[in-house]
Amino acid sequence: MTHRVTLLALDECFASNLVGFADLLHTANLVAAHLDARALSPFKWQVASADGRPVRTSNGLTLKVDGAARDLSPGALIVVPAFGSPQPEHSLSVLQRHSRLLIWLREQHAAGVTLAACCSGSFLLAESGLLDGRCATTSWWLGTLFRRRYPAVRLELGSMLRGTRTARSPPRALRRRSRPSCCSTVATTGRAAWPSRARPRDRRSRASSAGR
């Protein structure tokens, strides 16, 4: 079975969040083919922007996309990238420019699509209201702003990866504690269970030795 993933491209986002994620999925496909040449590739991905036009990332690179978010079938997972600035005020201005995606994200969640966000991208999920009453994480230097703007979200900055669930889905939360200054944090919410064959292995015993 092939699982489809949508990488949401936003102007001023980190290019690495898109390209790096695609590299991981591509590597997974290569490993799967090596293990069983007759098996289907486990992942297929597409890159979508709000309007279907190329986006200019925070480092100045222009990335082509496969189409507009509303015109593409999102598949099982949508990944929201981080905004490419360490300044909290800049994150808010970028957030306002992408506010038209909030309704679309709520629609996808209601349809059963799993949503994930990297670092400051969790602000976009929180802005949509989908994280209210749930646990989430974000980049540590944005913690104060996140708590002030989204008091209904239970922020856990000590978690490198934080999953949430609804009544329709089983717990899929993974927690890894690491140095806040070098961890890539993720906030997730969704109803669709992540494919069991692609689920990350639990490495809590290793992570505990690399704590703060």
Image (cartoon, grey):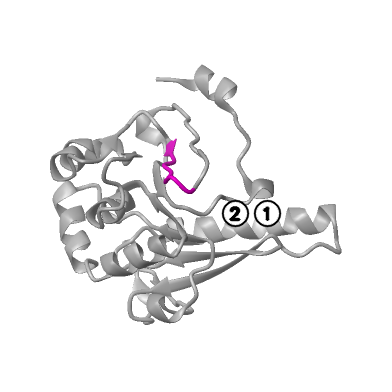
Residue 147 covered by magenta stretch: no
Q: Is residue 161 above or below residue 6?
A: above
Residue 201 vs residue 11: left or right? Answer: right
158 and 105: which is toward the camera: 105
Residue occupying image coordinates x 70% and y 59%: 29
According to the picture, the residue beneath numbered tag 1 turns out to be 28
Q: Is residue 177 above or below residue 46?
A: above
Mark 1 touches mark 2? (CB < 8 Å): yes
Q: Which residues are magenta?
A: 161-168
The quarter of the rendered structure image containing the N terminus is bottom right
Residue occupying image coordinates x 82% and y 55%: 34
The quarter of the rendered structure image containing the C terminus is top left
Q: What kind of secondary structure does the magenta stretch mostly adopt?
A: loop
Q: Amino acid at mark 2?
A: Leu
The CA span between labels 1 and 2 is 6 Å
Q: Amino acid at mark 1?
A: Ala
Residue 78 locus on image (x, y percent):
45, 61
| Residue at the far front in the pictured view | 167
Residue 194 vs residue 189: left or right? Answer: right
According to the picture, the residue beneath numbered tag 2 turns out to be 24
